[in-house]
Image (spheres, helix red, strand yellow):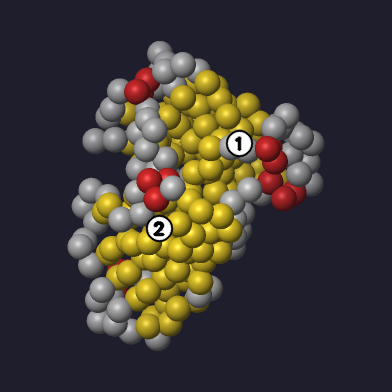
Amino acid sequence: EIVLTQSPGTLSLSPGERATLSCRASQSVNSYFLAWYQQKPGQAPRLLISGASSRATGIPDRFSGSGSGTDFTLTISRLEPEDFAVYYCQQYDSSPPKYTFGQGTKLEIK
Amino acid sequence: QVQLVQSGAEVKKPGASVKVSCKASGYSFTTHYIHWVRQAPGHGLEWVGIIKSSIDDTTYAQKFQGRVTVTRDTSTSTVYMELSSLRSDDTAVYYCAREPPHSYKFDYWGQGTPVTVSS
């Protein structure tokens, strides 16, 4: 079973700064199967990135995804006030079929 | 526009069952998959299962096998998730989410249904 570990657990930054969030898999993951979500308190998650690097419809270009194999990264180039939230990575494993999430990274205002 | 509208909050006693609905609109119901994902208070996201609406094929997370049943009604574009033998640690917000076929991503989500299990 593939386990996704996100780091750091909490990231404290100021608006305008650059955020780098990590998602590490216990085994190699097909990049096509790797996605990122943003969740704000009391709301459902929102898809940001799929296929490791493709932005979802309507997602600002300050969000970017990269990586392959076991190491994936979500970067927010210049933080806006509305970007402070919890971020999750997610992957699909075909054997047996299952979808798993990382434990999340909380991005908080410094 | 694509919408997934879920049923309202539920309070159940341990050992009971709960059935949550997810009504889809704004797209062709049978061409996409619907997943269920839950989130316990203060915790992360946990995948429960999937139904491929076109072929009524389901797959469940091993943790829930034997306790969860996902069904669909194509006449009303609604998917149902029933969880039985409820325990206190089933207390969570349950979300439905849409997956475009073979895309392995959840592009639209329902608003969530809080389920509380308490004696």
Calculate the distance from the C-alpha at mark 1 to the C-alpha at mark 2.
21 Å
Q: Is residue A44 left or right of residue B46?
A: left
Q: Looking at the picture, how far across and down is residue B50, in whole percent? A: 52, 32
Front residue of A51 and B69: A51
Q: Is residue A67 above or below residue A106?
A: above
Q: Dot 2 falls on which chain?
A: A
Q: Position of residue B2 (x, y in %)?
A: 29, 35
Residue A96's disc number:
1
Place residue B62 in its image quadrant. Answer: top right
Report the disc number at residue A21: none
Which percent across, then down, holds residue B3?
33, 36
Q: Report the quarter where the C terminus of chain A lies.
A: bottom left
Q: Residue at x 23, y 67 (%)?
A: A62
Label 2's element?
strand
- Amino acid, disc 1: Pro
Relative to residue A95, is residue B101 drawn left or right? left
- Above-or-below relation of A48 to B55: below
Q: Nearer the viewer, mark 1 or mark 2?
A: 2
Quarter of the image for residue A98 reads top right
Q: Residue at x 36, y 65 (%)?
A: A74
**Residue B44 seen:** no
A61 above or below B53?
below
Q: What is the quadrant of residue A75 in the picture?
A: bottom left
Q: Secondary structure at mark 1?
A: loop
Q: Going 40% across and 36% down the picture, which residue do you hit? A: B98
- Type of the residue with mark 2: Ser
Q: Earlier in the sequence, mark 1 or mark 2?
A: 2
Residue nearest the observer in this picture, A100 or A96: A96
Whether residue B15 is visible to the viewer of this picture, yes or no, is: yes
Depth order, front residue of B67/B23: B67
User: What residue would you read off at disc 2?
Assistant: A68
